[in-house]
Image (spheres, grey):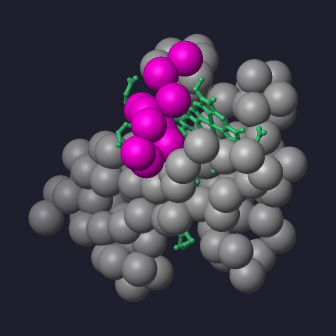
Amino acid sequence: MTGRSVRAAVATALLALAGAAGADLPQGKDSPGQVVFRHESHVDAAKPSCLGCHPRRFSILGRSGEAPRGALTHAAMEKGHGCGGCHGQEAFGFDECGNCHAGQ
Ligand code: HEC
Ligand code: HEC
Ligand code: HEC
């Protein structure tokens, strides 16, 4: 295997071991619908990187770790915290609620 495919295999194995294919994020007050975060649409299998999000932006320990709760309000995301580090910048923004919230 090349170094790149070894890194890809390790990242995939780590995600599988952790059962971290997706995370149903806990809903805040008046949240219009469940938001599911999917690793598969955020991690490039050919060039996996976890450091863009872990541990600075989101705890890798899941909800048992130190949850960045405040980072998942829209007020904080609009300032670039949590999902707002990319969404509203190089990734789609917050106007289409149904892009993230289920049932919208
Ligand atoms: C685009 C951002 C992003 C990237 C890149 C990313 N993650 Fe995550 N990860 C998250 C979010 C968001 C959560 C959910 C955090 C929460 O529930 O509080 C999470 C949760 C986790 C968890 C906790 C398990 C769970 O079910 O909550 C593990 C383990 C994890 N990620 C591993 C990885 C690994 C390994 C990589 C690299 C291959 C990776 N992550 C790349 C955003 C990311
Ligand atoms: C490191 C940058 C980054 C972060 C942080 C990030 N995203 Fe994304 N996300 C992207 C990119 C890039 C795409 C691809 C779509 C695009 O380019 O507009 C994407 C796509 C998505 C999609 C559509 C694909 C799918 O999985 O259904 C959803 C939904 C989504 N992100 C939700 C979230 C949520 C919720 C968070 C925070 C918990 C988050 N993202 C954090 C970069 C990011
Ligand atoms: C890029 C993904 C994304 C989009 C698009 C998005 N949201 Fe959210 N929103 C989240 C995440 C992640 C949370 C935290 C989990 C939760 O509370 O459901 C959240 C939480 C919320 C909350 C509760 C916390 C707070 O900030 O008050 C409300 C209300 C909300 N969203 C409304 C909306 C509305 C209305 C739209 C469309 C105009 C929208 N959202 C579009 C990702 C998104």
Q: Residue at x 75, y 32 (%)?
A: 74
1 to the left or right of 22: left
Q: Quadrant of the C terminus?
A: top left
Residue bounds of the magenta highlight: 95-104
Indicate whether 19 appears above or below 31. Answer: below
Instruction: Kindly tell me whether residue 47 is visible in this rendering.
Output: no
Q: Quadrant of the N terminus?
A: bottom left
Indicate whether 49 appears above or below 55. Answer: above
Q: Which of these two is toward me, 48 or 92?
A: 92
Figure quadrant, ligand 3: top right
Q: Picture coordinates of residue 22 (x, y %)?
A: 42, 64
Indicate yes or no whether the magenta region holds residue 17.
no
**In the orientation shown, which residue stands out farthest toward the left?**
1
Q: Residue at x 50, y 65 (%)?
A: 23
Indicate whether 76 appears above or below 101. Answer: above
Instruction: Kindly tell me whether residue 9 is visible in this rendering.
Output: yes
Q: Residue at x 51, y 29 (%)?
A: 97
Q: Main secondary structure of the magenta part?
A: loop
Q: Quadrant of residue 44?
A: top left
Q: Residue at x 41, y 45 (%)?
A: 103
Q: Picture coordinates of residue 36 (x, y %)?
A: 47, 55
Indicate yes or no whether the magenta region holds residue 99.
yes
Q: Picture coordinates of residue 4 (x, y %)?
A: 26, 52
Q: Picture coordinates of residue 89 (x, y %)?
A: 58, 15
Q: How many marks?
A: 0
Q: Which of these two is toward me, 104 or 53?
A: 104
92 to the left or right of 21: right
